[in-house]
């Protein structure tokens, strides 16, 4: 079998480079080992008249990494437009933030069609395709229309919301019908999978049996594959990172004071405002905790061209400044707020330095920071994880201190509890979480999905022939080859 993995963002095999987002960082070590071809966006664009899609191809472990220049005319409408201004807010249950024009949708479909054509170049007779995330909901259907009859899998790294929310996305029906071209559709949690199948039954009127549904594309199965990390590698990185200059400087600067850490992309789904408010409340309710605990919040800027992200950046910066103004002292800064990215190697050391990890998103597919924080701890004296019940990780890490990220006072109380937790309880909780993390690693996730995807080949009844192009997809332009 020849595996072709596709995602919008890809990662190069350079562990010391800052990385944005869980998907690329999580996939890198497993894709590297698997010998797969990983195809994604180069982050650059090129005019749409190119005869052959341009890809920079380099070796990646036993396989290869192909970074494609996406069509200039459609990149904005695809990435900042439909993917991140319509799908992302909907998938995170923020229907109020959905913004999408017809042009954005057309660009999204154009880029999906472009990617499908580009993939033909990397296909072999025994190729199996594994598409990642919401950027490419329609890519499977485009591949089928190009005559690809091999197994195609899809994994969604974000949550999948209730019907009422997804129905707020323009063209939702067409897109979700197109998703049924995937033989296997993977979700992070049972709830996501149930929401999806609920839509398929109620809105598409299809019969769901044992998680499978039959459409004109054949049989499609929806199932749960919670993503994991490589805990051994992370623990090693964390130990090693303790001597890294950034980590050493941080430790020296703390002067015995304790530290809470938050690491997120600057995104409205991450609950940053409520988190900062919770620390404000905690220092107000327990003034004795001033000078004994500070927060290091890393918030890496992301998708800056989108209005909602620009607004959030100003809002969080102002709030942090207000809280520091109220609680700070001439020689004490309550919140250290950094708008930049760090490599995983350094992050591991920062996590190990912090006695409390705060992972409090309003909605999150899995949130690998939660698992990484746990794996980075010192077994003899582990820190405490404060985790939102709306992160996928909460399904597995029940031994964390689970919080409701909308309840600011409740979070304030829980962070204070974390600080006073006795060593014996910290160890018990940490061991329980490590057990879960070690039984659901990224290697197992990858192997389980690929095995299930290969099995779909045997179960698949004969597919209907592709529909004539014009009836299926009117937007595909002749300009894109
Ligand atoms: O959660 C889905 C995801 O693809 C993650 O991998 C990552 O956190 C984020 O979205 C990537 O965002 P972007 O590539 O737009 O920075």
Image: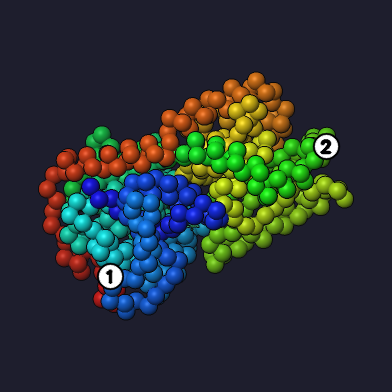
Mark 1: few/some/many CA within 10 Å (<14, 14-19, 20+): many
Q: Which residue shows up at 60% across the image and 48% down it?
A: 346
Q: Are marks 2 and 1 in contact (CB under 8 Å)?
A: no
Q: CA distance from mark 2 to mark 1?
A: 61 Å
Residue 85 appears in the picture as rendered: yes
Q: In the drawing, what numbered circle is on residue 287?
A: 2
Badge 1 element: loop
Q: Residue furthest top?
A: 424
Quarter of the image with the C terminus in it? bottom left
Residue extending furthest toward the right: 330
Quarter location, residue 73? bottom left
Q: Is mark 1 within 8 Å of ligand 1?
A: no
Decide which of 446, 181 is in the foreground and name it: 446
Q: Is residue 452 left or right of residue 274?
A: left
* Coordinates of residue 440 in the picture (x, y in percent): 42, 33
Q: Which residue is mark 1?
A: 476
For residue 444, the mark is: none
Along the horizontal axis of the image, is 30 left or right of 254?
left
Q: Confirm whether residue 268 shows in the render.
A: no
- The residue depicted at 13 percent of the width and 53 percent of the height is 464
Residue name at image x 19 percent, y 67 percent: 469
**Label 2: how many Cα within 10 Å (few below 14, some 14–19, many 20+):** few
> Residue 127 at x, y = what percent?
23, 52
Q: Position of residue 386 (x, y in %)?
A: 61, 35
Say which residue appears at 70% left-offset and 45% top-offset. Answer: 248
Provide residue 255's location: percent of width, then percent of height: 80, 40
Q: Quadrant of residue 125?
A: bottom left
**Among numbered discs 2 and 1, the one appearing first in the sequence:** 2
Tag count in the figure? 2
């Amino acid at each position: 079998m020849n595996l072709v993995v596709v995602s919008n963002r890809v990662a190069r095999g350079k562990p010391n480079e800052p990385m944005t987002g869980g998907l690329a960082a999580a996939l890198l070590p497993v894709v590297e080992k698997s010998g797969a071809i990983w195809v994604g966006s180069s982050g650059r664009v090129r005019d749409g008249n190119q005869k052959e899609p341009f890809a920079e191809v380099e070796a990646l472990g036993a396989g290869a990494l192909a970074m494609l220049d996406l069509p200039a005319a459609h990149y904005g409408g695809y990435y900042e437009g439909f993917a991140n201004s319509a799908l992302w807010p909907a998938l995170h249950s923020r229907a109020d933030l959905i913004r999408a024009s017809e042009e954005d949708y057309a660009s999204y479909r154009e880029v999906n069609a472009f990617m499908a054509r580009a993939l033909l170049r990397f296909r072999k007779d025994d190729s199996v395709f594994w598409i990642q995330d919401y950027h490419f909901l329609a890519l499977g259907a485009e591949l089928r229309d190009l005559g690809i009859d091999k197994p195609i899998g899809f994994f969604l790294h974000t949550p999948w919301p209730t019907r009422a929310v997804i129905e707020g996305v323009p063209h939702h029906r067409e897109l979700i019908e197109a998703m049924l071209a995937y033989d296997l559709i993977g979700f992070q949690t049972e709830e996501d999978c149930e929401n999806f199948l609920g839509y398929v039954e109620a809105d598409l009127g299809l019969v769901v049996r044992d998680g499978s549904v039959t459409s004109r594309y054949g049989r499609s199965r929806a199932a749960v594959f919670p993503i994991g990390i490589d805990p051994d590698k992370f623990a090693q990185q964390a130990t090693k990172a303790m001597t890294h200059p950034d980590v050493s400087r941080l430790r020296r600067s703390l002067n015995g004071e304790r530290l809470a850490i938050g690491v997120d992309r600057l995104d409205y789904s991450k609950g940053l405002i409520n988190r900062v408010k919770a620390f404000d409340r905690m220092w107000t309710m327990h003034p004795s905790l001033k000078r004994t605990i500070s927060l290091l919040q890393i918030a890496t800027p992301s998708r800056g061209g989108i209005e909602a992200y620009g607004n959030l950046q100003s809002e969080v910066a102002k709030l942090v400044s207000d809280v520091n103004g109220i609680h700070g002292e001439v020689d004490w800064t309550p919140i250290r707020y950094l708008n930049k990215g760090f490599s995983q190697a350094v992050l591991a050391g920062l996590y190990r330095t912090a006695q409390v990890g705060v992972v409090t998103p309003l909605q999150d597919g899995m949130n690998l920071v939660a698992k990484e924080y746990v794996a980075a701890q010192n077994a003899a004296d582990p820190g405490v994880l404060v985790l939102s019940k709306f992160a996928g990780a909460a399904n597995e890490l029940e031994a964390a201190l689970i919080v409701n990220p909308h309840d600011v006072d409740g979070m304030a109380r829980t962070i204070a509890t974390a600080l006073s937790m006795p060593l014996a309880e910290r160890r018990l909780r940490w061991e329980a979480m490590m057990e879960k993390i070690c039984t659901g690693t990224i290697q197992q996730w990858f192997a389980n999905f690929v095995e299930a995807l290969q099995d779909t080949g045997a179960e698949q009844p004969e597919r209907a022939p592709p529909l004539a192009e014009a009836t299926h997809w009117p937007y595909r332009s002749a300009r894109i080859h």
